[in-house]
Image: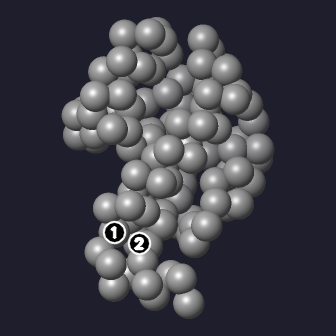
Amino acid sequence: MTLETLCTFCLSLPHVTEAFPFDQNTLVFKVGGKIFALLDVDNFDSINLKCDPEEAVELRESYSAINGGYHMNKKHWNTVTINSDVDDKLLLELTRKSHQLVFNGLPKKIKNELAL
């Protein structure tokens, strides 16, 4: 997976914005102002993605490249190592699920504003 491919995919999801709120290297993707993905643009070897807590544990047990979210709440976030035992198809699916999980957790008012 390339950085460009993953960024293009993230931006293709509904209502996504990108920003560098922490520093000039950490790119975040947000939906409704809430982060669903973080990655380092200079050292693109992993991505942090939100995950259902039960699924997060299952994924960590099944893939050596999926671990508790680096500098994140490990109950809700996974760090996925790029170009590892997680293939590109699964990585994109985990990214889509992260986006959907964050979107589903948004207040109804924000969801309605995004639908306009």
In the rendered view, tell whether residue 16 sits above or below residue 97: below
Image label count: 2
Q: Is residue 36 found left or right of 24 in the rendered image?
A: left
Q: Is residue 36 found left or right of 84 in the rendered image?
A: left
Mark 1 surroundings within 10 Å by alpha-carbon count, few (fewer than 14), some (14 through 19), many (20 or more): some
Mark 2 surroundings within 10 Å by alpha-carbon count, few (fewer than 14), some (14 through 19), many (20 or more): some
* Quadrant holding the N terminus: top right
Residue nearest the observer in this picture, 69 or 111: 111
Mark 1 or mark 2: which is in front? Answer: 1
Residue nearest the observer in this picture, 39 or 91: 91
Q: Earlier in the sequence, mark 1 or mark 2?
A: 2
Q: Classify residue 42 by image quadrant.
A: top right
- Residue 116 visible in the current orientation: yes
Mark carried by residue 106: 1
Q: Which residue is mark 2?
A: 33
Residue at x 62%, y 28% (from the top left corner): 90
In the rendered view, tell whether residue 4 sits above or below residue 81: below
Where residue 22 sits: x, y (%)? Answer: 40, 59
Where residue 48 sits: x, y (%)? Answer: 44, 39
Where residue 109 sits: x, y (%)? Answer: 33, 85
Q: Is residue 109 found left or right of 87 in the rendered image?
A: left
Residue nearest the observer in this picture, 64 or 42: 64
- In the image, what residue type sits under mark 1? Leu
Residue at x 28%, y 28% (from the top left corner): 54
- Residue 38 visible in the current orientation: no
Q: Classify residue 73 by image quadrant.
A: top left
CA distance for labels 1 and 2: 9 Å
In the rendered view, tell whether residue 41 sits above or below residue 21: above
- In the image, what residue type sits under mark 2? Gly
In the rendered view, tell whether residue 1 sits above or below residue 61: below
